[in-house]
Image (cartoon, rainbow, N blue to C red):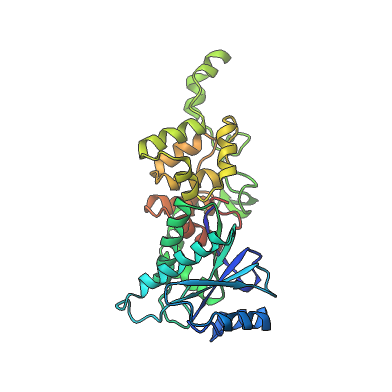
């Protein structure tokens, strides 16, 4: 499963484990650390007291969660940011790696992280995010189907979204088709995406049942063919196209692809085993981004499933922006989709 960035209070998460950024004393010294201790209650305080000073910077140790919604709390010790010259980034990345290793040892299938060291430890938001996503993504690609959440809460979520892709809003305004008639509609996949007010032109457009614009030249070139001839000359299926691109990109294992795409093994296998079944937009785009396809290649892959990206949809334009600018991190894309009010995320 993918790394999912969400705007939520980590103490409310219903997962197997939450990660607590703390210090070596495990005493709940400030911020979310203190709140976790307060919610956990006296039993958590007692267990932390017994394990005090056992965790060094970059390491992780677990306790039971007691009154919280999760089963375990994984405590990890970071380092105050000092301009990045004292090995702070390496310590941060180690915090994520060790926390994931401890979660694996505990048999956890889901885990929620805060943005380690981004609060009272003064690490810049972009640095903190970079030091989070690298070790988490590496772990998920190589070892795990674990659900991993990175919880941003309050002003930090807004700061991240604004700081990382300041040019996205301008790109949307420049590419969204001008409004002549507005209507309440869905993106190109109907109910696969969050509803939005999109723009259409007054002239009528012929659309297929799925809502995708058909290629008029394709209809003209095949209109005189018999049904058997048309079936014989049909384009490659989505799965055939997918494996073709995997070969071209040198991806040998399915797990390399679906983990990077943020797709569960079960979802991927269902797609592969039922070759006539087309994926959702979220799944198809996730796979395209995992393959690091160009925009034209992405459109060809989507077309094999009867879909396309359209300039009449803000959702599609955001996806297009990431692909055309070479940003293939799904967590970054999902963060921007959340910022723009969408709930259906890539890879979900």
Q: Residue furthest left?
A: 85
Name which quarter of the figure residue 274 lies in. Answer: top right
Residue name at image x 48 percent, y 54 percent: 140
Seen from the viewer's position, the closer of residues 25 and 14 is: 25
> Which percent across, then down, holds residue 287?
48, 44
Residue name at image x 46 percent, y 66 percent: 98
> Total of numbered circles in the picture?
0
Q: Is residue 155 left or right of residue 129?
A: right
Q: Is residue 100 above or below residue 73?
A: above
> Which percent across, then down, holds residue 16?
62, 63
Could one spot residue 226 in this view of the protein? no
Q: Is residue 182 above or below residue 221?
A: below
> Which percent across, then down, holds residue 270?
60, 37
Q: Is residue 37 left or right of residue 82?
A: right
Seen from the viewer's position, the closer of residues 115 and 225 is: 115
> Which percent across, then down, holds residue 214?
53, 33
Q: Is residue 124 above or below residue 285?
A: below
Q: Residue furthest front?
A: 50
Residue name at image x 51 percent, y 62 percent: 335
Could one spot residue 256 in this view of the protein? yes
Residue name at image x 44 percent, y 66 percent: 132
Q: Is residue 186 above or below residue 28?
A: above
């Amino acid at each position: 499963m993918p790394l999912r960035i969400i705007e939520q209070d980590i103490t409310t998460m219903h997962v197997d484990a939450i990660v607590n950024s703390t210090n070596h004393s495990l005493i709940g010294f400030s911020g979310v650390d203190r709140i976790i201790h307060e919610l956990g209650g006296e039993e958590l305080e007692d267990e932390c007291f017994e394990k005090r000073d056992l965790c060094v910077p970059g390491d992780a140790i677990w306790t039971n969660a007691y009154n919280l919604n999760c089963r375990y709390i994984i405590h990890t010790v970071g380092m105050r940011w000092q301009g990045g010259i004292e090995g702070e980034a390496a310590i941060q990345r180690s915090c994520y790696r060790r926390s994931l290793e401890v979660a694996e040892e505990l048999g956890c299938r889901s885990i929620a992280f805060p943005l380690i060291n981004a609060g009272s430890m003064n690490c810049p938001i972009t640095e903190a995010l970079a030091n989070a996503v690298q070790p988490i993504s590496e772990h998920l690609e190589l070892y795990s189907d674990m659900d991993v959440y990175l919880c941003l809460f309050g002003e930090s979520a807004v700061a991240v979204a604004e700081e990382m892709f300041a040019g996205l809003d301008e790109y949307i305004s420049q590419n969204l088709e001008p409004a002549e008639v507005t209507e309440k509609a869905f993106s190109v996949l109907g109910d696969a995406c969050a509803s939005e007010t999109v723009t259409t032109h007054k002239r009528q457009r012929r659309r297929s049942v799925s809502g995708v614009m058909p290629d008029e030249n394709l209809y003209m070139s095949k209109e005189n063919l018999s049904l058997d001839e048309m079936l014989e000359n049909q384009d490659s299926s989505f799965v055939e196209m997918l494996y073709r691109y995997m070969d071209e990109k040198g991806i040998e294992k399915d797990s390399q692809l679906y983990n990077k795409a943020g797709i569960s093994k079960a979802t991927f296998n269902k797609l592969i085993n039922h070759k006539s079944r087309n994926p959702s937009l979220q799944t198809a785009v996730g796979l395209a981004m995992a393959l690091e396809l160009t925009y034209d290649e992405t459109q060809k892959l989507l077309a094999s499933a009867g879909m396309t990206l359209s300039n009449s949809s803000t959702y599609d334009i955001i996806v297009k922006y990431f692909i055309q600018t070479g940003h293939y991190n799904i967590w970054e894309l999902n963060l921007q989709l959340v910022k723009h009010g969408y709930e259906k995320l890539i890879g979900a």
